[in-house]
Amino acid sequence: MRIAGQSGASASRATGRRAARQRRLVLRLLLGSLLLVVLGSAAAAVATEGDVPLTDSPTATALAEDAPLGEAYREAFVGEDGIYDPERGIVTPDEVAFDIEVEAAHDGENIYVRYDFPTPLPAYYHDYFVYRDGDWVRAGRSPVGTEPHGLYEDRITMLVDDGSVKGFANQGGWLTCHEDLRDPFMYASVSDDDVEAHPVLGDVYGNSDQRKYIPQSRDPDEQWWSFGGWGAMHPDRAEEYEQRRENGVFLDLWHWRAHRSEPIGYSDNQYVFEHRNASPGTGPYRTNWDDDADQPAFMLDPDVEGAPALDWDLIQDQDYGWDDQGFVIAEDVNAVAFDPDHQWEEGDVIPRRLLQTPDGSRGAITADSELVRDGDSDGWRWQVELARPLDTGEPTADKAFRPGRTYDAAIAVHRLATGSRWHFVTLPFSIGIDIPGDVTASRFDGERPDWDAIEPTTLTAMYPGQTNWQWLTSDEHPGASEVRDDSMSVLGCHDDEIGLAAANRAIEPGLAGVDAHVEEEAGMFGMVFDPTNAVLVFLVVGAGTVVGAVVLARRRQPSNIEQEGPA
C-alpha cells in the first residue's frame, strides 16, 4: 500500500518542486557562507591591522620583512614553550631562568661589582637610522617582546638600597613593578598623555610616561602597601615628596647598556622614586638628529671607519663584531658632521644614538666588559665589571657604601633584543662591605680586583611575567597578607626560583585578561579572531550549515516507495 496520499504523477511533480526549492536553499546558504567568509576575513584583518607598528613611517615598518636578525632573536627567546602574541602584549620565553654569577670588592675609594651571565645570541646593536627611498627612517625601539629588527641592546641593571625603602629587602624589583606602567607594556598601562597632564608627575616632575616607581612615592591609603595607583600624588604635597627622597627613600639604579654606554667605558647611573630618573649630570648618549635640518646630526668618519655609514645587510648578518666597536658612533672618536650632499645609498645606516663622555653623578659608574664564548656551547657570556665611588656625593640619587654595613640589591638582565618588562630578575640579596653578605665586598690592594681569587655568588635570574605589586598585595595572591606586613620574601610559598618563574609565565595571560578577550572575540572553537582563523571558522560553519540543510531536507522529503504493511 502507499503511505503517501498522492498519485504517482502528483508525487513526482511535488518532489521535483521540493528538490528545486532545496537546491535554491542550498545555493543561498552557500552564498551566505561565502559572504560570511569575506566579511569575517575583512573584519579580522581590521582587528589585526598594524600588529607590529615598528615606527611611525610605513617605509620603516616594511624593514621588518628584511630582518633575519630579529627573527633569530625571536626564535631564541620564544623557543618551543614560549608564547608569541605581541598584539595582546603576551610574549613569554622558552627558558624561564638562568644563573648569574656576582662578585664584589672595594679599594677604600671605589666599589667594584662583576656580573657573569649567559646569552644564546648577544645583542649589542641598538636603534639606527636607515636610508630608504630618499628618507632616513628609524629602525628599532622598545618592543613588545623581542625587537623585530634585532636592534635592542643587552642590558644589566642593579637596584640598591640601604634599608630606607620599605619592602625592598623582601620583594626586590617587584616593589617597583606596577600594573599601570607605561603603555603598552602592562595590562593596565596608563597613557603618556595622562601622565603629562598630571599636576605632579607631569607639571612638577616633567615626566612624559610612567616607569618604575616605589609605593612610598605615592600617597598611601590606610596601609603603606596600598595607594590609589600611579596618579596618587597631590600638588599640595610636592615638597613632602621631595623631602622623602632627601631622607633617602629611593632606590639607587646601576644601568649598564651594551650599546649606549659600554663602548665608551661607562654605565648609566639612575635612581627610582616616582619614576626611573637619571642621576644629576650628563648622560653617556644623546639622540643623533638635527631637528632643524630634519636629518642626522653626525655620520661616521670615513677616515676612521672607511665609510660614512654602516650597511643594513651587514647589520642583519651581525658582521659588525663586538671587538671592533664599529657599530656605534661616538663624539670625538668616529663622528663627523653629517654631509647631506653625499650620495647616500639604499640601505645605508647611521646610529641613532651619539655616544658622549658623561659627567656628574650620572657619569660616576665606569665599565669594562668582555663578551666571551660560553665554554664548548654555541652561546656566549657577558662578563661585565662596573666601578663607582663608594660615595658619589649625591645623597638624593646615589646610595653611599660604607664599610661595616650591608645593603640590599636586586638584578635584572635584558637579553635577546628585549626591552621594557621582558627581563629576567633575581631575588633580593645582600651586599656586605667588609662584613659577610650574600655577596661580600672585601677590601683589596692594587689597581683592580683579582676576580679569580674571589668566590662568586651564584644567583638565579628568572622571568617575572606581569606579576606586579598590585597583584602580589591583592586577595588573589595566596601570600598577600605576608607581603602586606613585609614578613615574607617574594619566593614565599614557592619551592624555588624555577617554580616561581614557571608560575609567573603560566599566569601571565590570565593577568593580562587574554582569556576573557579571546573568548569575546573568538568564534565557536575558541580561536583567536585573525584572518586565517576567521576564514577557517566561517568555512566550517558554512559547510556545516549546508550539510545540515541537506540532511534536514532529506528527512522531510516524502517517500515515493511502496512499502508492505502487515497482512
Image (tube, rainbow, N blue to C red):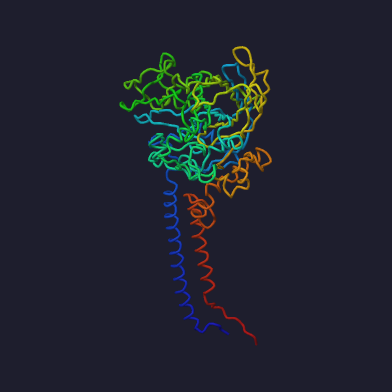
Tell me: residue 517, above or below residue 443.
Answer: below
* Left/right of residue 420 with respect to residue 480 in the rendered view: left
Say which of 468 and 82 sits in front.
468
Task: Classify residue 505 by image quadrant.
Answer: top right
Tell me: residue 132, above or below residue 46.
Answer: above
Percent position of residue 226, x then y? 53, 44
- In this rendering, the count of numbered labels is 0
* Left/right of residue 421 with respect to residue 455 in the rendered view: left
- The answer to whether one can see residue 288 in this image is yes
Residue at image location 64% in from the left, 39% down from the top: 491
Percent position of residue 349, x then y? 42, 25
Percent position of residue 228, x then y? 48, 45
Say which of 3 and 317 sits in front.
317
Say which of 145 and 396 sits in front.
396
* Left/right of residue 439 with respect to residue 419 in the rendered view: right
Residue at image location 46% in from the left, 39% down from the top: 182
- The answer to whether one can see residue 95 in this image is no
